[in-house]
Amino acid sequence: MEWTADRVRRLWDYESAHPERYFAYKYSKSLVSVLKRHLRGARRVLDYGCGRGFLAEKLLEIGVDVAAADDSPRSVAFVEERFRGQKGFLGASTVDDLQKSGERFDAIFVIEVIEHLDDAALEELFERVRSVASPGATLIITTPNAEKLRASEVYCPSCDQRFHRWGHVRTWTADSLAAYLSSLGLDMVETIEGRFAKVVPGQPLRSLWGRFQKLSRGAKRPHLVAVCRVPVDAA
């Protein structure tokens, strides 16, 4: 099945009623705990593809100033209402409006987005991200690690088509992701393969970094993170 823009929108409009299924709902607390070392010195942080704002929430909790952006006006309105007036919240906007604003950010998170994009959309994503990144900005990108796409396909008896349950169209490894980011002129910092601890609201945070490192050495490493930087001399 071809994932058209309308089909993608309808899928996520439906899934928005089930926030507990979102990657960011389950893993944002662990993600921020592990990666906040890359935010030292970052004054303005952007959650790009913010969804319902689960990552933005955890970033605000560690005291950084956070803006949120999404292609979905519905998500933007929800996040704006959710965090309006909260200390450190810089506002939510559509990706188009953000680009027009001329704002720049010291760190940008792109969480579980790139596995959904074909070549043209992937190129457009990074053009947009670069346009709002300050020179020297840190980019943090997550995606499933070496995902076997066929394993998550389901069959629709109505349209007689198979499709990936979450609309993924490509799979990444640490090597392929690092190579792609380097081809864009970004400076690689590190890639991390592992399993983030699932921490849902109300669950305590217990030594997530140590747990992540231990599980990273195991055979099953479903999560992939790439950290890179925009060159300081970038226009």
Image (cartoon, rainbow, N blue to C red):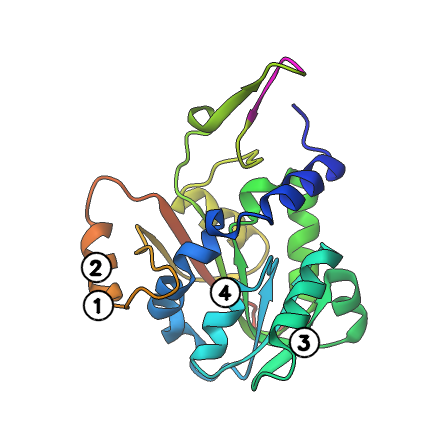
Q: Label 3 crowding class (10 Å Cα cut-off): few <14, some 14-19, many 20+?
A: some
Residue 64, position in %: x, y?
A: 50, 82
> How many numbered circles does the render carry?
4
Real-space Cα distance between discs 2 and 3?
33 Å
The residue indicated by pointer 2 is 211
Q: Which mark is residue 91?
A: 3
Specify the quadrant that holds the N terminus. Answer: top right
Amino acid type at circle 1 is Ser
**Label 3 vs 1, first from the N-terminus:** 3
**Label 3 vs 4, first from the N-terminus:** 4
Of 66 and 125, the residue lying toward us? 66
Amino acid type at circle 2 is Arg
Magenta residues (range): 159-163
Real-space Cα distance between discs 3 and 1?
31 Å
Q: Is residue 85 above or below residue 202?
A: below
Residue 9, position in %: x, y?
A: 70, 43
**Label 2 vs 3, first from the N-terminus:** 3
The residue indicated by pointer 4 is 55
Does residue 142 appear in this view? no
**Label 4 vs 1, first from the N-terminus:** 4
Residue at 30 percent of width and 56 percent of height: 197
Q: Nearer the viewer, mark 2 or mark 3?
A: 3
The residue indicated by pointer 1 is 207
